[in-house]
């Protein structure tokens, strides 16, 4: 089974930065898409970014493009993958629980595998 472990959340002031990490293990990751989602209190979950399993292209939700940057790296034998979400110029409305998810292809609706979330709080 795939395990996805998100970390790096915390409390930050508006305008600050945070870097989230997602450690993936449990299969080979040469053909595996990883995405970041978030869910704010009282709101629906939304997809933020995704690295394609096919060509490594990165997709962003329009509202975070330019502020958030996703990247990833694999171990040499592709048995572990780490995805990152660098979040800059954070706003109070970015406060949410952030989740990493993975699967065969990118989707901003849902993915096959999910990790536990990491909470991000942006104070004004």
Image (tube, rainbow, N blue to C red):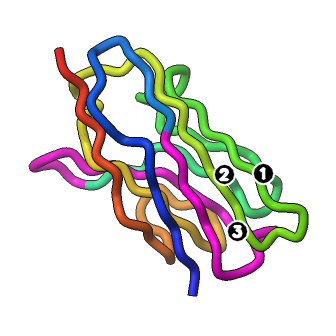
* Residue 82 part of the magenta-drawn span: no
Q: Earlier in the sequence, mark 1 or mark 2?
A: 2
Residue sitting at 35 percent across and 12 percent down?
15
In depth, the one of 42 and 21 nearer the eye is 21
* Residue 27 part of the magenta-drawn span: yes
Using the numbered discs, state the Cα–Cα distance from disc 1 to disc 2 in whole angstroms: 5 Å
Disc 1 and disc 2 in contact, CB within 8 angstroms: yes
User: In the image, is 94 to the left or to the right of 17?
Assistant: left
In depth, the one of 9 and 90 nearer the eye is 9
- In x, y percent, where is residue 28? 77, 77
Q: Which residues are magenta?
A: 20-44
- In x, y percent, where is residue 5? 48, 63
Disc 3 and disc 1 in contact, CB within 8 angstroms: no
Q: Residue furthest bottom?
A: 1
User: Which mark, by number, is residue 56?
Assistant: 1
Q: Earlier in the sequence, mark 3 or mark 1?
A: 3
Quarter the N terminus occupies: bottom right
User: In the image, is 98 to the left or to the right of 18?
Assistant: left
User: Which mark, by number, is residue 32?
Assistant: 3
């Amino acid at each position: 089974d795939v395990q996805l472990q998100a970390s790096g959340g915390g409390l930050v002031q508006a305008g600050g930065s945070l870097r989230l990490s997602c450690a993936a293990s449990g299969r080979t990751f040469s053909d595996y898409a990883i995405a970041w989602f978030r869910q704010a209190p009282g709101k629906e979950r939304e997809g933020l970014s995704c690295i394609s399993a096919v060509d490594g292209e990165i997709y962003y939700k329009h509202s975070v493009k330019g502020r958030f940057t996703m990247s990833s790296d694999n171990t040499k034998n592709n048995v572990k993958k780490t995805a990152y979400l660098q979040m800059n110029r954070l706003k109070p409305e970015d406060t949410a629980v952030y989740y990493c998810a993975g699967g065969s292809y990118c989707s901003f609706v849902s993915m096959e595998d999910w990790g536990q979330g990491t909470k991000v709080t942006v104070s004004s």
